[in-house]
């Protein structure tokens, strides 16, 4: 037990140093997540080993009253939206040992565990019967073949959506997806998956273009921000930095009539001309950070529309105030922070993730 406790203390110290250490020792965000994941896994393993030793110590105590019960885990609730499957475990017998007949149910204990149903692949077989008149006079009748996104190809729209989400949202390359599919008994080559994704992208491009036009046409205010994205640079053996420009609308905080939506535009850089191109024809308000690339859009020199109104980000302003606050304090800064907090309280809306502020917006939009 002493050795395990010393091991756990060392692991916790490593965890704190990794997470809260000096900036000079900080890892890149992606590397930090991996490091913390490994440390948290190791800590959990050591804690489980300590619990097993405690159980053995308690079991070896001859006096039951002196056995120290294990501390209960903190109660946690699973989301109510998840479906529940009840499994009632009955005793082997409910016959009263004193001859009173069956015992009466007086209560129950409930416990919940999170389960997973593994994904499975299936083949959809579409059958279209042909019918003809019994005497051969009325010709042949047959239902039209259902329309598919990729005609004369194997994948259903659901499978194409799964592959696309895994690649672009969960960052799972097609070669890894091919390995997973083969493990499930579906040997599809990576090049075939790439062909499916390329054709799908070409076919849904008009839908994305329509979404982008609708955001510009139906909105009174849009969030705009840009974030880096590594892009392959063929021939150089490395990646280059591209940018995803996010144009987002979310008026749920004030029950606005327009539905929420977001469209990402890829551009090779973050020049102001790209912002002008993306927002061409939009003439109301954009909510942005203090990046100078948006400033020219609010001047009469703007091309592609009238001068825009710029609504700046309170989160950025608040951050600068905190950084400028002297150690001995400042009544002016404290007053401003209180006023910003009042705005945050008014705009107490559910959090929305946008590709901005390096994906680090505060839990609430205080803009």
Image: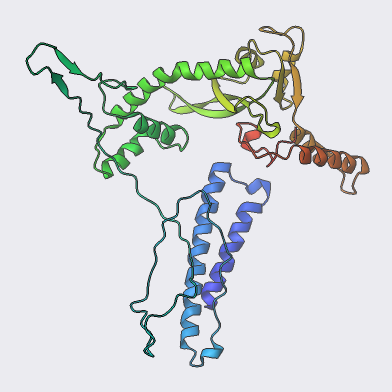
Whole-percent x, y for residue 257 in the image: 65, 25
The quarter holding residue 339 reads: top right
With 155 as the anchor, is 42 left or right in this view? right
The quarter holding residue 184 reads: top left
| Residue in the foreground of this view, choosing between 241 and 134 | 134
Is the C terminus in the top left, top right, bottom left or bottom right quadrant? top right
With 271 as the anchor, is 190 left or right in this view? left
| Residue in the foreground of this view, choosing between 35 and 135 | 135
Can you name the residue that lies furthest to the right here? 331
Whole-percent x, y for residue 94 in the image: 37, 79
The quarter holding residue 366 reads: top right
Q: Above or below — where is 187 with respect to 84?
A: above
Rendered residue at 73%/21% (across/down): 292
Q: Above or below — where is 220 with respect to 347?
A: above
Rendered residue at 52%/78% (across/down): 1
| Residue in the foreground of this view, choosing between 152 and 66 | 152
Q: Above or below — where is 82 with respect to 99?
A: above
Rendered residue at 63%/57% (across/down): 16
| Residue in the foreground of this view, choosing between 168 and 92 | 92
Q: Above or below — where is 185 with respect to 66?
A: above
Whole-percent x, y for residue 162 in the image: 39, 35
Whole-percent x, y for residue 177 in the image: 34, 38
Can you name the residue that lies furthest to the bottom here? 63
């Amino acid at each position: 037990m002493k050795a395990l406790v010393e091991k756990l203390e060392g692991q916790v110290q490593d965890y704190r140093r990794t997470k809260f250490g000096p900036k000079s020792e900080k890892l890149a965000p992606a590397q930090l997540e991996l490091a913390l994941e490994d440390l948290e896994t190791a800590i959990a393993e050591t804690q489980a080993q300590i619990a097993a030793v405690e159980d053995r110590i308690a079991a070896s105590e001859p006096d039951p009253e002196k056995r120290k019960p294990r501390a209960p885990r903190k109660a946690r609730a699973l989301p109510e939206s998840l479906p529940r499957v009840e499994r009632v475990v009955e005793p082997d017998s409910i016959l009263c040992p004193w001859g009173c007949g069956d015992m009466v149910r007086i209560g129950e204990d409930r416990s919940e565990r999170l389960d997973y149903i593994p994904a499975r692949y299936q083949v959809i077989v579409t059958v279209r019967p042909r019918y003809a008149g019994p005497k051969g006079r009325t010709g042949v009748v047959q239902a039209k073949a259902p329309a598919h996104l990729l005609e004369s190809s194997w994948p259903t729209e659901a499978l194409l959506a799964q592959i696309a989400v895994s690649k672009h949202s969960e960052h799972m390359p097609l070669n890894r997806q091919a390995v997973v599919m083969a493990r499930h008994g579906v040997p599809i080559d990576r090049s075939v998956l790439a062909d499916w994704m390329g054709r799908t992208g070409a076919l849904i491009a008009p839908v994305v273009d329509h979404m982008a036009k609708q955001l510009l046409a139906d909105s009174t205010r849009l969030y705009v921000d840009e974030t880096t994205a590594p892009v392959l640079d063929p021939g150089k053996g490395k990646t280059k930095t591209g940018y995803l420009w996010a144009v987002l609308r979310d008026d749920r905080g004030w029950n606005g009539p327009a539905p929420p939506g977001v469209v990402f535009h890829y551009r090779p850089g973050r020049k102001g001309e790209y912002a002008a191109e993306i927002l061409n024809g939009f003439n109301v308000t954009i909510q942005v950070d203090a990046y100078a690339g948006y400033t020219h859009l609010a001047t009469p020199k703007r091309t592609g529309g009238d001068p825009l109104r710029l609504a700046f980000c309170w989160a950025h302003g608040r951050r600068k105030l905190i950084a400028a606050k002297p150690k001995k304090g400042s009544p002016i800064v404290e007053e401003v922070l209180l006023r910003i907090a009042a705005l945050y309280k008014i705009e107490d809306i559910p959090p929305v993730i946008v590709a901005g502020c390096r994906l680090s917006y505060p839990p609430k939009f205080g803009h």
